[in-house]
Image (cartoon, coloured by chain):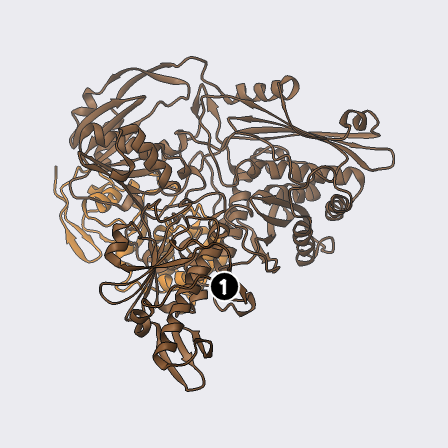
Chain colours: A orange, B brown
């Protein structure tokens, strides 16, 4: 199997995996970065969202061979001390219930705020529409994005 | 002050000096009465005796609490700890919470289901905290040589006001361990609560937002193998032949194993196993009867409603006469489909079956049952099986079943290796244990004076257990009443789905009552209050719901929503008693581009004492979103025994844009907690349907609502 040189959260990794392996499973099974979650495997739920060159990407359908030299950021690398404005807002608003989808929600929201630091409610809804929260914490996810946007 | 004077058993609360210094207070929940403590000599002894249910106070003042019940987002780790800390007068910033492993010797009811954990444990948790506080106060009083009655405890300190002396819990922990354990400890008056009823943030927030490995799917053990199982795609079929050559030849595949009706692929990574599984060539054949389709179910429902051999669940008065003498009869049928639980974390479990015992790790709502089933299957005694409970990425009842735990254990025993079994989303949605499909026929008789004189409900369920809740409202409020049930046995597997049965029945009943109120020309809220007044003044048969509590939520819902006074919105009402709590809801709908849009839902809950206002709001708002989402969109249909939806592209879940504003309120009546994990869900479908009727004149009687023509207008 080929060796891929990946840059993830500013660190270099060289996993030896089949080229069609989705980035999600490289992160989870081969690199021990399990903060990125499997939810559906077909880019429908957003639980696996990471940033590739700053853009929110569903890692469950992104083959590792397509990552190339891109800079990948996962939830583990969103901030050095877990203090990204969204992470602190998530705590302040007390967003999580089971918590399983929240890494994906945070990564989608972080990509949104990077492009658009002060989104309207409608822009938040549009950006977050691809992320499912089965506990139904949508009100607090929405609110926490607003809270974070005020801190940026 | 309220005092716990019940229960003289002394072996539930265990106190000891920690080997490293400090007070260890172990407690368990083995009896229905709150626990009474006993001193034990040291931690090692406690461990040997299996007392790993405890709170400990270390010399630095850190309080560690083991939370026994599986955490799936109901926030039990936070609320259990709050109850202990309240009575302990702990400094909340020094409380740490840890998930306890399965330990049936130390814990009682170590499961998550039935909205029952807080009601079950409320008093014993309070007693555990109060007992520790008593001992800390006594230790300080001894040191100061003053009566304990002159000392108070607050925020992790014992204080002697007269002398101005203070000592921290940490500094008192060792001496407190030597204090004789009190038999009866006073509990706080609820007016003195400082933590209970407040908004306290989830103790796991930091771990969740930084992506820590909390969940079963995150568990990793050096040398473990990954496994997926191909199960029959259609219920009612079995394996005829298996050709696994191509799968076995794939890179990373260690073995392909056939057991029961399963073909398991075991390998070195999830992706390799998943790829190889697709190359299995499996032929199936019918296992007895004919694999069923949704069209078959529709025919079965009609046939059983008309000709089924029904069981009478409740009968009051002379129903036949009431309908024979009726001036008007209202008759409606309501139907709901199968639903998948689809928690965001799919089923998975780690199992390592060794010659000397079994290690199980993963997400389960019923760890004790999972271990027991594993023990029976493998013929290994339960005391040789450990089960570590990880955080659950949702449950909704799916993880009350332990099929996936037993699969993992059986597979590990066959391949003689540690394995992590993973279900894909497709496995989850097509793999069974669904909310049963149901259909109800309601009939109401109204006499010439406009009185509701007769009421009938006949329910049909497919593997539903029992599709009716015959003693719920409006039973007891109508002279002549008949509730009947009939079941269809199917190869399609079903299970408890958040608020079992009532998750659909509440909609059907509350929508039908709305039909009756409309036919009688009555306001829907007043109609229910009139029925309750009747049930109170002159009950018909037994009443198994609390009339005052139901009236309470109805009246508060009417008040908070401005019922009947609002212009520009159409309101729908619903109220339901489930488990042990009461929730009333008012839904507001407006018309946009010719279609009804749900704008807001008021949800008024009486769950007794609210422990964590933040967590309680989460349960109510999340329950409403869940209830509305599945009423609007949820549908699992079958063709020749196989589910027709298999992932979130075809099985629709509610998303952010679909969610209305939700305004939760709580009745503050001071009764002990009655649970909140499920009760907010059942009323939502009815409130939404009744509001849509108000807005459009169209009655929605089948779920999912989205298939109705009113949502297809352009």
Identity of the residue furthest to the right in this view: B449
Vertical order, B678 against B422 (above or below): below
Q: Which residue is found at the position 46% from the left and 79% from the top?
A: B150
Q: Position of residue B632 (x, y in %)?
A: 55, 39
Identity of the residue furthest to the bottom in this view: B163
Q: Does residue B667 appear in the picture of this structure?
A: yes
Estimate how packed mark 1 is, as few (under 14), some (14 to 19) or many (20 or more) residues with alpha carbons within 10 Å: many
Q: Position of residue B172 (x, y in %)?
A: 32, 73
Q: Secondary structure at mark 1?
A: loop
Left or right side of B410 for A102: right
Which quadrant of the figure has residue B80?
bottom left
| Image quarter of the N terminus of chain B | bottom right
**Residue hosting label 1:** B196
The number of callouts visible is 1
Q: Which residue is found at the position 27% from the left and 60% from the top?
A: B41
Q: Which residue is more in the foreground, A121 or B607?
A: B607
Q: Which residue is more in the foreground, B35 or A12?
A: B35
| Image quarter of the C terminus of chain B | top right
Left or right side of B204 for B538: right
Q: Which residue is more in the foreground, B471 or B693?
A: B471
Vertical order, B234 against B448 (above or below): above
Disc 1 sits on a residue from what chain? B
Q: Position of residue B11 (x, y in %)?
A: 38, 53
């Amino acid at each position: 199997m080929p060796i891929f040189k990946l840059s993830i959260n500013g660190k270099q990794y060289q996993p030896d995996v089949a080229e069609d392996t989705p980035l999600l499973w490289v992160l989870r099974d081969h690199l021990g970065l399990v903060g990125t979650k499997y939810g559906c495997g077909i880019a429908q739920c957003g639980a696996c969202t990471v940033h590739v060159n700053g853009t929110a990407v569903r890692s469950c359908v992104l083959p590792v061979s397509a990552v190339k030299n891109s800079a990948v950021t996962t939830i583990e690398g969103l901030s050095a001390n877990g203090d990204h404005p969204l992470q602190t807002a998530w705590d302040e608003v007390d967003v999580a219930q089971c918590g399983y989808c929240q890494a994906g929600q945070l990564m989608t929201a972080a990509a949104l705020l990077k492009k658009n630091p002060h989104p309207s409610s409608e822009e938040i809804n549009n950006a977050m529409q691809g992320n499912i929260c089965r506990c139904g914490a949508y009100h607090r996810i929405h609110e926490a994005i607003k809270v974070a946007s005020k801190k940026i | 002050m309220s005092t716990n004077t019940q229960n003289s058993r002394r072996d539930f609360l265990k106190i000891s000096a920690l080997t490293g210094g400090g007070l260890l207070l172990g407690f368990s929940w083995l009896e229905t009465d709150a626990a009474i403590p006993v001193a034990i000599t040291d931690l090692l002894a406690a461990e040997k005796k299996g007392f790993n249910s405890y709170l400990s106070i270390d010399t630095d003042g850190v309080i560690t609490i083991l939370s026994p019940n599986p955490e799936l987002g109901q926030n039990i780790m936070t609320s259990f700890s709050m109850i202990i800390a309240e009575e302990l007068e702990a400094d909340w910033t020094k409380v740490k919470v840890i998930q306890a492993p399965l330990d049936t010797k130390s814990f009682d009811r170590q499961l998550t289901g039935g909205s029952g954990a807080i009601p079950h444990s409320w008093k014993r948790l309070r007693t555990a905290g109060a007992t520790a506080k008593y001992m800390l106060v006594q230790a300080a009083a001894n040191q100061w040589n003053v009566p304990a009655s002159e000392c108070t405890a607050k925020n992790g300190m014992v204080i002697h006001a007269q002398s101005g002396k203070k000592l921290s819990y940490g500094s008192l922990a060792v001496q407190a361990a030597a204090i004789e354990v009190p038999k009866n400890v006073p509990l706080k008056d609820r007016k003195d609560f400082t933590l209970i009823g407040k908004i306290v943030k989830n103790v796991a927030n930091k771990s969740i937002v930084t992506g820590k490995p909390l969940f079963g799917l995150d568990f990793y053990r050096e040398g473990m193998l990954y496994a997926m199982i191909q199960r029959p795609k259609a219920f009612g079929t079995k394996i005829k032949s298996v050709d696994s050559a191509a799968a076995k030849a794939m890179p990373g595949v260690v073995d392909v194993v056939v057991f029961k009706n399963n073909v398991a692929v075991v390998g070195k990574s999830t992706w390799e196993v998943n790829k190889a599984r697709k190359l299995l060539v499996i032929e199936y054949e019918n296992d007895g009867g004919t694999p069923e389709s949704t069209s078959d179910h529709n025919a079965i429902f009609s046939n059983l409603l008309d000709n089924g051999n029904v069981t009478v669940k409740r009968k009051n008065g002379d129903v036949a006469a009431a309908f024979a003498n009726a001036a008007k009869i209202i008759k409606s049928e309501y139907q709901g489909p199968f639903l998948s639980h689809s928690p965001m974390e799919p089923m998975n479990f780690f199992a390592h079956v060794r010659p000397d015992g079994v290690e199980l790790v993963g997400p389960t709502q019923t760890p004790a049952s999972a271990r027991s089933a594993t023990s029976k299957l493998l013929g290994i005694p339960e005391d040789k099986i450990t089960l570590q409970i990880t955080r659950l990425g949702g449950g909704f009842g799916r993880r009350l079943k332990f099929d996936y735990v037993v699969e993992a254990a059986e597979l590990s025993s066959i391949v003689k290796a540690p394995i992590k079994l993973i279900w894909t989303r497709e496995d989850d949605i097509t793999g069974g244990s669904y909310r049963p499909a149901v259909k109800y026929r309601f009939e109401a008789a109204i006499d010439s004076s406009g009185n509701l004189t007769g009421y009938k409900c006949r329910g049909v369920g497919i593997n539903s257990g029992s599709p009716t809740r015959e003693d719920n409202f409006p039973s007891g409020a109508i002279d002549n009443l008949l509730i009947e049930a009939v079941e269809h046995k199917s190869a399609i597997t079903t299970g408890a789905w958040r608020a079992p049965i009532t998750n659909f029945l509440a909609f059907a009943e509350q929508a039908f009552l709305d039909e009756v109120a409309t036919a009688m020309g009555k306001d829907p809220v007043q109609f229910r209050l009139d029925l309750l007044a009747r049930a109170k003044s002159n009950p018909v048969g037994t009443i198994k719901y609390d009339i005052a509590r139901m009236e309470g939520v109805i009246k508060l819902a009417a008040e908070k929503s401005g019922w009947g006074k609002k212009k520009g919105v159409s309101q729908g009402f619903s109220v339901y008693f489930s488990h042990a709590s009461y929730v009333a809801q008012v839904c507001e709908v407006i018309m946009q581009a010719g279609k009804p849009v749900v704008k807001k839902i008021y949800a008024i809950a009486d769950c007794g004492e609210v422990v964590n206002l933040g967590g309680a709001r989460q349960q109510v708002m999340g329950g409403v979103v869940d209830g509305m989402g599945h009423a609007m969109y949820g549908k699992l249909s079958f063709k020749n025994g196989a589910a027709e939806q298999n992932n979130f592209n075809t099985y629709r879940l509610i998303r952010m844009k679909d969610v209305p504003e939700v305004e939760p309120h709580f009745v503050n009546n001071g009764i002990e907690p009655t649970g909140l994990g499920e009760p907010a869900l059942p009323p939502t479908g009815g409130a939404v349907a009744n509001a849509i009727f108000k807005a459009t004149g169209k009655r929605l009687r089948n779920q999912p609502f989205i298939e109705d023509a009113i949502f297809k207008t352009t």
